[in-house]
Structure formats: C-alpha cells, structure tokens
Amino acid sequence: MENVSFSKRIKGWMMYDWATQPYHTLIITFVFGPYFAEQVIAHLSASGLDEASARAQAQSIWGMGLTISGLTIAILAPILGAIADGTGRRLPWIWLFSACYTVGAAGLWVATPDDFPTITVLTFFILGMIGVEFTTIFTNAILPSLGTKEEIGKVSGDGWAWGYVGGFVALIIMLLFFAENSNGVTLLNKAPLLGLNPDLRQGTRFVGPYVALWFIISMIPFFLWVREPKSSGIHIAAAVKTGLISLGATLKSLPSRKSLFAYLMSSMFYRDALNGVFAFGGVYALGVLEWSVVNVGVFGILAVLSGAVFTYVGGYQDRKYGPKPVIIFSIVVLMVICTGIISITPDSVLFIPVAASSSIPDIAFYICGVGLGAVGGIIQSASRTMMVRQADPERMTEAFGLFALSGKATSFLAPALIAAATTVSNSQRMGITPLIALFLIGLVLLVWVKPDGEEVG
C-alpha cells in the first residue's frame, strides 16, 4: 500500500501537532489574542468609552469570533467526517483545510493599528480556526492505525508533547526577533528583524504570516510520510448520501450507547472550559494585570515548555492507567488553577492583599501558566485516545467529527458566558468564573463513561 516505513508514518503524523500548535500558542493565546484586545481597547477608549468598559468589551468581541468559528465547526464536522469515511479518504480534506489555515493565518497581517479593521481581522481569524479544527478531525482519525489500543495513548502523548515543543520554539523566535512591546523593541531589546516597522506594529502583526509559513514547511513530512489507500472508487455523491445516512443512524443510536454518549457530553463541557482558559488567558492578563504582549509571551513560553514536558510524561500514564483517570485528575487540577487565576489582581493573590508594587501577583500568574500548560496538554492528548476507545473502528473519522461536534456544539457557551458575565459585572475577573462550573459538569458526567467503551457481545 505504501513504501514509507511504519515509524516514519508515526513521525509524519506527529509533525501535524508540531505544525499546528503555533496557531493555538501564538495566535489564539499569547501573541495575537492580546494584541487584538490591545488594539480594540485603544480604539474604543479613543471613541470615548471608559477604560474598564473598553477592556470588557474587547473580551466580548474576541469571544464573538470564537463563538462564530465554533458554531461553524460544530455544524459541519460530523457531516464531513461521515463523508470522508464513506470515501475512505482523509488526505484530500486535510489538503483543503490546510489551505484555509494558511490563508486565515497569513491574513492577520492586515491588523494595522492606525485603522484597526476589526471585522476583517475576525474573518481571517475564523477562517484559520476552521482550518486548524477541521484538519485536526481528519488527522486524529488516522491515530488508531498507528498502534494498538494501549500504544496509541503513548503515540498521542508524544505527538502532543512534540506539538508543544514546536509551539515553544515558534514562540521563542517570535518574542526574541519580532513581537515588539510598547517601546518598539523585542525581548532582546532590539527592533524587529526584516526591517519591520515597530510604529505600525509590523513585528507583532507578522505573527500571522509567520505561523502560516511555519505550517507550510512543517507539513511537508506529514504529506510525504502519511499515506492512505487509494480511493475506493465510490462517487462523491454516493459517499455523501451514505455518509449522511450513517451519521443519522449514529446520532439516533447515541442514547443507547451510554458510555460514548456520556463521554461526548462530558468532553463537550470540559473541553469548552479548557478552550476558554486558553483563549482568554492572555486577554485576561493584559486587562487585569496590565501586562504587555511580551509579558504575555513569556507567560506563554512557560506554559508551552511545561506542556511539552508533562504531556510526554502523561503519555506514559495514559498507557499505564488508561485515559479516564488521567482526564479526571486533569479536570480537578484545572478547576484549582482557574480559582487561582480569579484570585489574582495587581494588589492581591488568593484573595489576600499584597503591596501595590509587589511582583507576587505576576509570579503567581506565571505559576498558573505553568500548571495550565502542563495539565492542558495532558488532558487534550488523553481525550483523543479516549475517543478512540469509545468509537466504532469502522467509522473513526465520523467519530472524530462527532468529537469535534461535542467540542464545538457548546463552543459558544464558554465565550458567551464569559462575555455575558464580563458585561454584567463589568469585571474581567468575574467573567472567568463560569469556566469552573463547566469543568465541574464535565467531571460529573465522566461517572457514566466506561474506560474501554461499550462492551461487545
């Protein structure tokens, strides 16, 4: 079927995580997200809105972009997954959505500070989000073919850890040589490379084209080494019909497949909460602690580095104990971290007052970043191996389409709850509190999830 060795196929598959992690790390969380908030705040303040309201509204607008992309993915993911299973082809879909990823990321270059085009920027951001989420569905569906039930937990963990290494390297390069602070210099105290104009924030805006180029280069081993059987010859129209029929039957059967149904529901809530923490962490630090984009980037370095180390270790725990205990432990730790984040202000830590000039709040937030990166990677890796255990092996892409649906069906929920709580309270701190409740719901629903899926026979 292919001339590529099995080990090369695994390495090629792992390169997908390396290629896409910078979108999450640099664009959503630690560089572009805070820059977006910074520019929206500046323009709203210039229009006469008070600063506190401007910061809250910027967080709400960012949430709107995440909500729109999430709903789009939720609607289309299971349908496209079912169609892909019908044709037996996944790589053509990966090519298609890789193009969306590249165009969406590169398009963020238009985010000029002089006349910030909020709608255009959100449009490119949403296109990139759609690209990264849909390519993830089809690459995750390849995971079961890379080892036994016990081995894939380690493969998944290694892949996710390797992705974190990629995110770490990409972020270090960005902060050292391109992303400028308010003084127009990078972390090396120098102007951005390539003659990029710091007055126009070209160093920070370069994050879009940079992430797109990183993806293009990094995906070369994936497309060279990850092969699949030739097309089954099924016409696309027949595949659409067959796929939709199969998807309908799967959806109807979910209530009777209690373990799978419970897991999809559980992951719907805890992954939504996790995405909320990552998506709003940088925006929160910029607004509450008044950090610069570079400060948030350092926070990101610590989070990504801890993620690379601990996710690799988590892969061993997944293989030894299975994914369910790993997920439970991770959710509990994430709830503690969220509580810690809410307790941090410029003059308090764990709700205990500190001196106004104290660096303790900054240090505490950095510690939360280390914990978030460590546990966030572990739970995401274990989640996809748990999905493999719950799914029908013959309908794996459809299953990961449903997995994406469960992760996006309420993807509007965390951003919407954060936006609503932030707007009502006019406080970014109070806006984060709904995430704890979402984690708790996900934890409770895991009670009905069987570690190895439905019993056969």
Image (cartoon, rainbow, N blue to C red):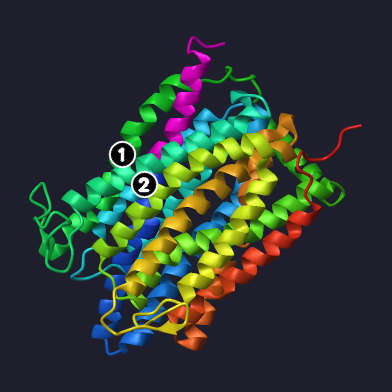
**Element marked by disc 2:** helix
Asked whether residue 398 is in view, the answer is no
Reading the image, the residue beneath label 1 is 214
The residue nearer to you, when weighing 161 against 250, is 161
Using the image as rendered, state which of residue 450 and residue 132 is in the foreground. Answer: 450
Q: How far across and how far down the image is residue 283, in percent?
A: 38, 69
* Three-letter amino acid code of the residue under disc 2: Pro
- Tell me: 76 left or right of 254: left
Q: CA distance from mark 2 to mark 1?
A: 8 Å
The structure residue drawn at horizontal position 77% and vertical position 40%, both measured from the top left corner, is 245
The answer to whether residue 243 is above or below residue 291 is: above
To which residue does mark 2 refer? 22
Residue 64 appears in view: yes
Q: Is residue 2 magenta-colored?
A: yes
In the rendered structure, does residue 414 fall within the stretch colored magenta?
no
Q: Secondary structure at mark 1?
A: helix
**Mark 2 / mark 1, whichever is N-terminal:** 2
Percent x, y for residue 141? 60, 34
Foreground of the two, 372 or 45: 372
Query: Residues at badges 2 and 1 in contact (C-beta under 8 Å)?
Result: yes
Q: Which residues are magenta?
A: 1-19
Where's the N terminus, which quadrant?
top right
